[in-house]
Image (tube, rainbow, N blue to C red):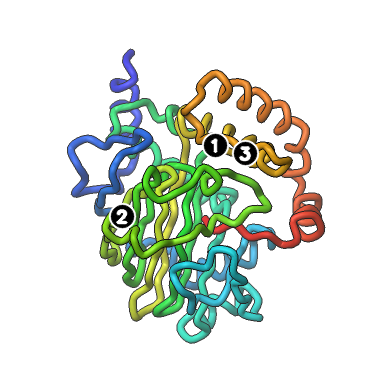
Amino acid sequence: MTQAAIASKTASAATRHFSAHPTAINMQVGMMPFKMRHGLADNPLFSLEAMTDLASALPRDKVDYNLANLPVDVAGKHVPFNGLSPANTIKSIETCGSWMVLKSMESVPAYNALLDELVDEIAHLSGVAASTFDHRVAYGFVTSPGGVTPFHLDSEHNFLLQIAGTKTITILPHQATTTAEDIEISPAKSRYIEYRPAFSTLAQTFELSAGDAVCVPFNDPHYVENGDSVSVSMGVTFHDLTTWHRRKVATVNHMLRSIGLPQERPGLRPGQDKMKAVAYDAFNAVIKPVRDNQTARQFVKKHLLRGAAVTP
């Protein structure tokens, strides 16, 4: 059975969430952003009450939040904390001027089931088997009126689904607006990168209201400006073999840069990239027990990474 046939069989039994999409989705590195519609605007999993419960249930290092009255460019700058607990941040989100991300929502069965439905459907629309898209992660975003998510990038395929409220997302092509260092990956490295006014001529801007979804291509930097009401969004991220390989290489490149050996972008030297991917796999086998242990993970973040935050 062909990949397309497998994908069609899988999707036919699954719930349909997307509509008004292109006739065929291109999920290749370097594709263009595009907009779709989804049917999750009234889903109770994304009510503020549900988000509050989730923020209280997730491990503390899976909840990041800060004040949201920020400029588009905060690269190298301090992003202020709001002084509240995660639950109280959401309870007062209308007035506290904050932004929050709930990471690894898929650790909760109901969100994991929804994530799989969404990614399986994207695979079907792309004409590939559902198993093509792996390393699936779901994020929940809750933002105060007028909040800004500064210029940053995400090293995965990324769909932003607007559940409640409105926002504007501005996306730029990574090939023309990032450096080799910008796209490198490390837990100790913020994803905020420098924004330059000259980039504005390359920008694509999408207005999102409840029921809208936008595809943010792999590594394409973007910033988000919230509307005049509370916003709730879901981030759906995943990888194919190409993006996962590039993520491995980008991680090793950052390690090498940190010891004085700056590297070129992934993809320019395939032979070297393959060796870096092997090195990544070996290193990952050693640190995986730490990553999978909540206490050890929180110790590393607090004492070794000094609380470094990553913006999804």
**Helix, strand, or loop for circle 2?**
strand
Mark sitting on residue 247? 1
Q: Which residue is mark 2?
A: 213
Residue in the picture at 54% in, 36% down: 247
Q: Quadrant of residue 57?
A: bottom right
Q: Give the residue at x 64% y 41%.
A: 254
Camera-near label (2 vs 1) is: 1
- The tag earlier along the polypeptide, 1 or 3, is 1
Q: Position of residue 206 (x, y in %)?
A: 27, 60
Q: Which of the two discs, 2 and 1, labels the residue nearer the N terminus?
A: 2
The residue depicted at 47 percent of the width and 42 percent of the height is: 156
- Expressed as whole percent of the image width and height from the top left, the position of residue 144 reads 45, 77
**x and y percent of residue 24 in the render?**
22, 35
The residue tagged with tag 3: helix, strand or loop? loop
Q: Around disc 3, counting alpha carbons within 10 Å, would you say few (fewer than 14), some (14 to 19), or many (20 or more)?
A: some
Q: Secondary structure at mark 1?
A: helix
Mark linked to residue 262? 3
Question: Is tag 3's residue or tag 2's residue first in the polypeptide sequence?
Answer: 2
Tell us which disc is closer to us: 1 or 3.
3
Residue 280 appears at what percent x and percent y? Answer: 66, 30
Q: Quadrant of the N terminus?
A: top left
User: Neighbour class for label 1 at 10 Å: few (<14), some, many (≥20)?
Assistant: many
Q: Residue at x 36, y 65 (%)?
A: 197
Q: Is residue 126 left or right of residue 151?
A: left
- Cα separation, mark 2 vs mark 1, equals 24 Å
Q: Alpha-carbon distance for marks 3 and 2?
A: 37 Å
**Spatial CA span between label 1 and label 3:** 16 Å
Question: Which amino acid does the dot numbered 2 rest on?
Answer: Ala
Q: Amino acid at mark 3?
A: Pro
